[in-house]
Amino acid sequence: MAGGGGQLITVGRVVAALEAAYPPELAESWDAVGLVCGDPADEVRRALVCVDPTESTVDEAVELGADLVVAHHPLLLRGVHGVPANTPKGSLVHRLIRSGIALYCAHTNADSASPGVSDALAAAIGLTVSAPLSPKEQPHLGLGRIGELPEPEPLAVFAQRVADALPETAWGVRAAGDPQRLIRTVAVCGGAGDSLLAQATAAGVDAYVTADLRHHVSGEHLDSAPHAPALVDVSHWASEWPWCDQAAGVVRAAFGGNVETHTSTRRTDPWTLRAARTGRTAR
């Protein structure tokens, strides 16, 4: 398939478009971003964007007839000495190659880019973004975002807003703080964001939305200052899923209808159920 001046649309060309939007140099030093498998010269007619490169999303890519999977999380984050097919991740690499599917990962470079992962989360919630929460290199780049709601609303209402904006998970949405506290300014960070709690407090926002918040860290945060932001804790996967449409839009903007793009519909959040105590007696 030709596009953009009659040139064949290849894996390499799509990767170049993605890396223009999510520059690899923005990635953290420990990260593993870029093309995991696939020939840069191979043609791309159909692409699937997902958060996690898992057996489920590879199934989805095969069913779609995709030539390229664009994932947020790396498949091979830690150093490996081999990818034998009898290991979980090795089997995925072999299946992708046998199916003629390339895999490209944009992780912390997509977190710090503008727009990036946290912009997509902020937009889903309905925030108008004003700045990064933790700037990096340039004022508009960095982790997290600070934004504002159109009108103030109680924390209980805001937590429901977040729940309604994101895909449903067994984890659900939890909030910490006075349910009646008015929320107008909000910091967000897609993925695990407890490392930015101090920045959220320093920013003076009313609430901070992120994922994977821990008991002691959250309690100490709430006690750290009289007006420490209320916390809204969501599933890691759900917080980053809005980025999939953003990345798909990067491919569409570069190649129009010449590359058919799909956002994954598979829930790859690891938690599958939630149970609540049914008895009345506290123990």
Image: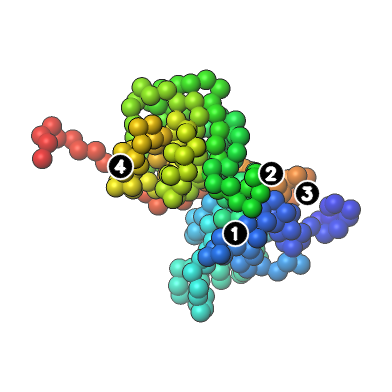
- Looking at the rendered structure, the kind of residue marked 1 is Ala
Task: Indicate the position of residue 58 as horizontal and vertical percent values.
Answer: 55, 58
Q: Which numbered disc, 1 or 4, marks the residue closer to the eye?
A: 4
- Looking at the rendered structure, the kind of residue marked 2 is Gly
* Residue pointed to by mark 1: 27
Task: Indicate the position of residue 10 as horizontal and vertical percent values.
Answer: 76, 61
Residues at circles 1 and 4 in contact by the CB criterion of under 8 Å: no
The quadrant holding residue 94 is bottom right
Residue 269 in sight here: no
Q: Earlier in the sequence, mark 1 or mark 2?
A: 1
* Residue pointed to by mark 4: 219
The quadrant holding residue 211 is top left
Q: Which mark is residue 255?
A: 3
Q: Earlier in the sequence, mark 2 or mark 4?
A: 4
Q: Which mark is residue 249?
A: 2
- Secondary element type, mark 3: helix
Q: Residue, x 50% and y 44% (percent of image)? A: 189
Residue count near mark 1 (Cα–Cα under 10 Å), binned few <14, some 14–19, many ≥20 = some
Q: Earlier in the sequence, mark 1 or mark 3?
A: 1
